[in-house]
Image (cartoon, rainbow, N blue to C red):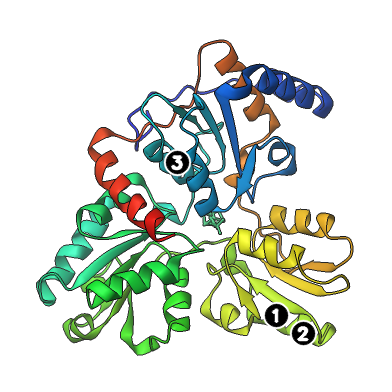
Amino acid sequence: MDQNTGIKVLEPDLADYYQLSADILDERILRVKTKLADRLLLLGHNYQRDEVYKFADYTGDSLKLSQFAAEQTEREYIIFCGVKFMAETADILTTPEQKVILPDLAAGCSMADMADIETVETAWEEIARLIPEGTITPITYINSSADLKAFCGERGGLVCTSTNAEKIIRWAFERREKILFFPDQHLGRNTCKRMGIPLDEMILWDPTKPNGGNSPEAVRSARVFLWQGFCSVHQMFQTQHVDYFRKQYPDIKVIVHPECSMEVADQSDMMGSTEYIIRTVTSAPAGTRWAVGTELNLVNRLKRDNPDKEVFFLSPMVCMCSTMFRIDAPHLLWSLEQIEAGTPVNQIIVPEQDRHWAKVALERMLELA
Ligand code: 13P
Ligand code: SF4
């Protein structure tokens, strides 16, 4: 049983699919895709492997893909090549007739799992005991489960992505004095810092400790409460990697995702979403050099698609998102053939009790975006 959706999870036996050569997998994927044509929409996040990315009708970052999902009201099936919070978002934003499929249900996000509804509710109550009523807005990064999006929607808060975090935080501060930002401390800190909010007005909230590990005075005076979550992939980029490339190539530009630590973000030349990174490097003049701090599949593709530039991966370690990597050609073909057979699998269905407020939180963001 899947814990979030309550749906029975069919454990696939994909052994036969793994026997197929890459050519046969491609041929069969293309055949079903062509057959299903307008009934199907295939979305691919920028971190997906090439073997599935190349079949996507639309590719992009979390914001762009959620916008596509919201616009495509005619497609009966949406296969989401990405991770679970993205498929949940698509399910919330599509019509009840549309079915969102995640080819591998184990494709989650370890950062999203660092905040859950019980601990966020506890934190909210602890904070509420110490500050005046109606002075704080909850903001969840889109990398979170649907019930946390609903939590924000119901309390006047909203969702943000790496593209629009600044706009969303600004919107929140126009209404109330404080924000609770979860689950990614780094996106929250990097964005607030660039907006000019001093670090001593931000506190880190450790959900395992009373008051998040803060004194009552610190809670009362803080403007920004940062949940202690992080993306382990982006923590692999370190300042010594930036130093190495700067020493080696004084003209190099360093571009990173805002899930990187503040120290790395501060030393970079540019910071933005996966889509921003792709757009910036792709439109840069020939002959320029780039060190890129985000997931490996994206950077390898960027290297290949920009032979007129020198593109380097910022870390000497292999920083790959292992859950994004789970969606491979055998899983994609399996989910397509199950649709063709009339027995679709791995449908993501957000529970009814979370749908309404999660949609409110997402729509507040989409209106601003
Ligand atoms: P983007 O929205 O920038 O694509 O980021 C999603 C993500 O999970 C990055 O780790
Ligand atoms: Fe989650 Fe990090 Fe993977 Fe993005 S790269 S999906 S934040 S684990």
Mark 1 and mark 3: Cα distance apart in space? 38 Å
Tell me where residue 344 appears, x and y as whole percent. 50, 18
The answer to whether the residue labelled 2 contacts the one labelled 1, judged by CB atoms less than 8 Å apart, is yes
Label 3 crowd (10 A; few <14 / some 14-19 / many >=20): some
The secondary structure type at the circle numbered 3 is helix
Q: Amino acid at mark 2?
A: Arg
Q: Amino acid at mark 1?
A: Val
Q: How many marks?
A: 3
The residue located at (71%, 68%) in the rendering is 292
Tell me where residue 345 appears, x and y as whole percent. 50, 21
- Mark 1 Cβ and ligand 1 under 8 Å apart: no
- Residue 258 occupies which quadrant of the picture? bottom right
The secondary structure type at the circle numbered 1 is helix
**Quarter of the figure that contains the N terminus:** top left
User: Mark 1 — residue?
Assistant: 242
Q: Is residue 366 above or below residue 108?
A: below
